[in-house]
């Protein structure tokens, strides 16, 4: 399915952005802005391709790229002029977004070598907050985040080792998605800590960020077969029982946000957080920082430590890297082993929860605060982010409100490969703020993936559509069986006009559907499940259940569940209603199917499809039958009502 969008042409978007960049007075955002002629030529090519019918879901969007990520023909500097090299090819992440129609407007500033969470450690100057120029942007993906917040770009690539794709998102009131490690390729990225680096995406809203992430991710780390594609209707989330480093007003705002979640039907419970904090401290205070030296230490050492500083090294960053080179090997080995133990403890604390919700940033410091205590403030900024990649978790940072004039963000953190689950929960939190006063004219509007298609499906997760007509429809008593397996509700559909529906004489009542030359369209709903989830669901089916397919009104087909003809031939015809719920409402004795606890067995269903005539006298083959839900199964000899 295509992602639909409206908005300016790529050419119009480029013209608007170039004018806005010129007028913004924010040169510190960029290290390189591409020339107008080059940009307009590329945009015209995108517009021509769209006019010719090409499927380019990011056409009309401008992409900013953090300058530790390769863009062909633009010097990659990692905000260190002496480190510069000119790549011949785009990084894999950049190439994927450009192939989908995005136009790279330029390369953005960052904390040098992606070492920092403040956005001030660069010879190109500190990147200022989009709303309050005396405040920091957050880093290290500082320029990318502010470019998106100000509407100078529509999406932006960041990187994230300790929180660099989340902290600036929180401070700028935008969305940052940090996928499970290596789901997005790091090919063409200057490493910071190679074992824990991630390529991230920024956007002003979650829908656009998901679309871009679904295109950027994939082809690197394989997805397992049992990926959950959504959170349950009533998810269960954990949150820290204590809130270190948060000022009183920020802690109170976090409490209000948790209460808002609970009022919206999310079960939120506190957990002890010390294990996560211990892991966070390991990243810089222990042996793991040796990876910083492994990444760029040789260059820093070769550049020397002279007053002239021809390489343009940031003194704080250079000091961190040099000290990392003094970490003994046994310390690194000891701390990686300790990290494994902390991860086991953390995962035990999260057992039974769908996600963890934390503040994205603990406060919003001023530029003066960072100048007075550059290391201390930076360390504090990573309180709720440093542990994430060390534990191989995924996360989505979203705006949630304001506190003391600052943007207040929440981050939803999930287990490895639970990327769709955390995005689903984040959608219930997201509260986009008003744009900054300097917001650029001509910014592209939001884009969305097709309904019910989580971004991991776009990124390569194998999924199976399942069509249901009865008790497994959204909000009905057996829908939780699908939700428990991580199914994503993908909207309403209608069958082709080749089926009839009967009410089966069961307790509770359930519909049966069968093929007929005198059939009608029937109302149904579609879910997406992983292959393993579908297999798990099917493994609990009793006889006489079978697997088949059903034709939909748009000509497509979907998987469903079938039973033998005997079970469906004894029902009462209700085709005239065209909808099981309408038939139930019209029946004096009609009632919704009970939940699983009333059935007393494993997953059972609701509707069966068999091939037959209007007289219901013939039996179908497996290829011709469909059960669009799960049922206990009608046994031969069941009587008509």
Image (tube, helix red, strand yellow):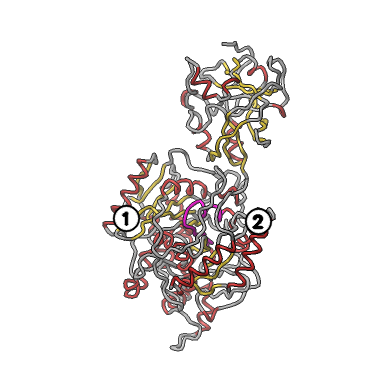
Q: Give me the disc on residue 525.
A: none
Which residue position holds label 2? 50
Relative placement, left or right, of 556 versus 298 is right
Q: Circles 2 and 1: CB distance less than 8 Å? A: no
Residue 470 pos. (x, y %)? 55, 26
Query: 295 or 442: which is nearer to us?
Result: 442
The image quadrant where one finds the C terminus is top right
Magenta residue span? 196-213
Residue 341 pos. (x, y %)? 45, 55
The image quadrant where one finds the N terminus is top right
Disc 2 secondary structure class? helix
Residue 492 pos. (x, y %)? 56, 35
Relative placement, left or right, of 182 versus 409 is right
Q: Relative to residue 224, is residue 88 depicted above or below?
A: below
Which residue position holds label 1? 243
Residue 588 pos. (x, y %)? 47, 15
- Label 1, residues with CA under 10 Å away: few <14, some 14-19, many ≥20: some
Residue depicted at x 32% and y 75%? 372
Q: Kindly tell me whether residue 331 is visible in this rendering.
A: no
Query: 492 or 201: which is nearer to us?
Result: 492
Disc 1 secondary structure class? loop
Q: Relative to residue 127, is residue 482 depicted above or below?
A: above
């Amino acid at each position: 399915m295509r992602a639909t969008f409206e908005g300016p042409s790529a050419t119009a978007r480029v013209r608007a952005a170039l004018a806005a960049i010129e007028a913004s007075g924010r040169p510190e955002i960029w290290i390189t802005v591409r020339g107008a002629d080059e940009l307009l030529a590329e945009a015209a090519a995108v517009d021509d391709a769209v006019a010719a019918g090409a499927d380019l879901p990011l056409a009309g969007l401008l992409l900013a790229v953090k300058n530790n990520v390769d863009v062909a023909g633009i010097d990659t500097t990692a905000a260190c002029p002496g480190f510069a090299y000119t790549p011949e090819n785009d990084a894999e992440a950049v190439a994927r977004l450009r192939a989908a129609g995005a136009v790279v407007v330029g390369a953005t500033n960052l904390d040098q070598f992606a070492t920092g969470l403040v956005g001030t450690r660069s010879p190109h100057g500190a990147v200022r907050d989009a709303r309050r120029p005396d405040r920091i942007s957050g880093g290290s993906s500082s320029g990318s985040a502010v470019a998106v917040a100000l509407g100078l770009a529509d999406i932006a690539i960041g990187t994230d080792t300790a929180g660099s794709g989340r902290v600036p998102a929180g401070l700028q009131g935008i969305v940052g998605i940090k996928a499970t490690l290596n789901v997005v390729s790091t090919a063409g990225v200057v490493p910071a800590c190679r074992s824990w680096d991630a390529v991230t995406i920024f956007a002003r809203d979650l829908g656009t960020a998901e679309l871009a992430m679904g295109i950027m991710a994939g082809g690197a780390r394989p997805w397992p077969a049992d990926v959950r594609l959504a959170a349950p209707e009533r998810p269960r989330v954990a949150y820290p029982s204590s809130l270190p480093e948060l000022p009183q007003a920020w802690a109170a705002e976090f409490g209000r946000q948790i209460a808002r979640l609970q009022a919206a039907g999310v079960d939120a419970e506190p957990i002890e957080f010390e294990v996560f904090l211990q892991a966070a401290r390991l990243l810089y205070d222990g042996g793991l920082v040796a990876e910083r030296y492994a990444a760029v230490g040789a260059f820093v050492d070769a550049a020397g430590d002279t007053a002239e500083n021809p390489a343009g090294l940031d003194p704080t960053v250079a000091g961190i890297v040099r000290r990392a080179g003094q970490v003994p090997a046994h310390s690194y080995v000891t701390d990686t082993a300790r990290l494994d133990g902390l991860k086991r403890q953390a995962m035990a604390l999260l057992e039974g929860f769908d996600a963890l919700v934390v503040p994205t940033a603990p406060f919003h410091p001023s530029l003066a605060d960072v100048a007075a205590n550059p290391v201390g403030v930076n360390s504090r900024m990573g309180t709720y982010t440093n542990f994430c990649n060390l534990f191989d978790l995924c996360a989505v940072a979203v705006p949630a409100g304001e506190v003391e004039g600052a943007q207040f963000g929440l981050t939803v953190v999930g287990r490895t490969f639970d990327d769709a689950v955390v995005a689903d929960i984040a959608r219930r939190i997201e509260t986009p703020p008003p744009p900054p006063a300097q917001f650029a004219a001509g910014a592209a509007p939001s884009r969305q993936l097709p309904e019910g298609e989580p971004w991991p499906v776009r990124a390569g997760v194998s999924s199976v559509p399942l069509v249901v007509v009865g008790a497994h429809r959204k909000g009905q008593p057996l829908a939780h069986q699908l939700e428990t397996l991580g199914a994503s509700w993908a909207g309403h559909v209608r069958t082709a006009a080749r089926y009839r529906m009967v009410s089966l004489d069961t307790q509770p009542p359930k519909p049966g559907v069968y093929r007929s030359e005198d059939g009608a369209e029937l109302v149904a709903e579609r879910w997406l499940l992983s292959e393993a989830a579908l297999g798990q669901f099917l493994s609990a089916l009793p006889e006489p259940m079978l697997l088949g397919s059903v034709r939909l009104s748009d000509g497509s087909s979907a998987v469903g569940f079938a039973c033998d003809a005997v079970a469906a031939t004894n029902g009462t015809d209700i085709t005239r209603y065209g909808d099981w719920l309408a038939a139930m409402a019209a029946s004096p004795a009609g009632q919704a199917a009970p939940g699983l606890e009333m059935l007393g067995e494993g997953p059972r269903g609701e509707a069966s499809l068999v091939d037959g005539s209007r007289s219901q006298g013939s039996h179908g083959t497996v290829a011709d039958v469909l059960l669009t839900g799960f049922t206990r199964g009608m046994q031969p000899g069941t009587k008509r009502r």
